[in-house]
Image (spheres, rainbow, N blue to C red):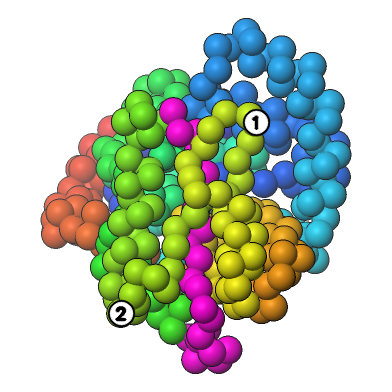
Amino acid sequence: MKYTGKENFDHAVTPRLGVLVTNLGSPQRADKKAVRPYLKEFLSDPRVVEIPRLLWWLILNVVILNIRPARSARAYQRIWTDEGSPLLVNSRRQAQALQKLLHERHGERVVLDHAMRYGEPALPDVVQSMIDRGVTKLLLLPLYPQYSCATTASTFDALAQDFTRRRWLPELRFVASYHDHPSYIRALADSIRAHRAAHGDAQKLVFSYHGEPRSYLDKGDPYHCQCLKTTRLVATELGLDEAAYVSTFQSRFGKAQWLQPYTDKTLQALAAEGVHSVQVICPGFSSDCLETLEEIDMENRELFLQAGGERFEYIPCLNDSAAHITALGDIVEQELATWLAQPENDSNQTATLARQLGARN
């Protein structure tokens, strides 16, 4: 079903609460032909790249889109699964598990679905599907624990743009971040404990977050501060000394200064300093994806070992683990609390009245 922009409020539909979870997105296939339009959509977003539009259009279309798709396709091929992109697979599993949890607690009253900011499933199509299922109050939960203008705000932009084409709009709530939510912090800490119970400790625990240009921080983006707070809270939960861990930033692009310290350079420096074992976790990613599986667990693993390190362990993202689904459920229920507190019979009053009026006519 493709959204056409032509919809009306159905007075006879039983009103429901909707939860829309979103993530960044992924190409549909791991080949140059599929990667190019995905990259074009992603890198054309003015929230992602804050360069004057005309200059960036020239750089993107003349240079980047003629070079990067083939390289990115090779990287995707290294992590692609029989089911497709790990991010798409994990996102689908997360949505299914969270829907099951909410159904067990609230029955048919809550409708949950998932969409991607770029690519498929497209946000406008999913929003329309949810409205068709009776959603009159919508909670948007971007699965970015730490707020960033390039991710969280961009998702809100996409929803707002979709809403400009609609006559009737559902009541809206928006989760800007959950970087310090107790359930999220516990889930991260428990995943580290479980990994260490199975594999032992390492000399250094590296918290690697996706990078962003330093200029974003200078302009007031709270992402850097929220990343450091997440690290501090997890370290406190684990009882770690400051010398036992470090926060770093990965995935920089271009020649501008990005948030530091950089993950790759930090790992090389640690090995050169005599740190033989590291464990790396990526708390800014709710799902394993290209940046965690290929960049961290492959490229950065190789950098550390080549620099003299002996043991590199990647601690997977929370993905669809029970602890993560519970944490997301806690966040959702906290945000839906006042809506859930309203008697269900009251929420159905409009639909009942509409059906009665229809019968009279």
User: Upstream in the sequence, badge 2 or badge 1?
Assistant: 2
> In the shown orientation, is residue 124 left or right of residue 334?
right
Measure the C-alpha gap from mark 2 to mark 1. 37 Å
* Front residue of this view, candidates 329 and 201: 201
Compared to residue 286, the image places residue 101 above or below, namely below
**Residue at numbered disc 2:** 239
> In the shown orientation, is residue 91 left or right of residue 167?
right
Q: Position of residue 97 (x, y in %)?
A: 48, 70
* Residue segment shown in magenta: 194-215
**Residue at numbered disc 1:** 254
Residue extending farthest front = 273
* Image mark for residue 150: none
Q: Residue at x 53, y 33 (%)?
A: 257
Q: Position of residue 200 (x, y in %)?
A: 54, 89
Give the SS element for disc 1. Answer: loop
Q: Residue at x 21, y 43 (%)?
A: 350
Q: Position of residue 212 (x, y in %)?
A: 50, 38
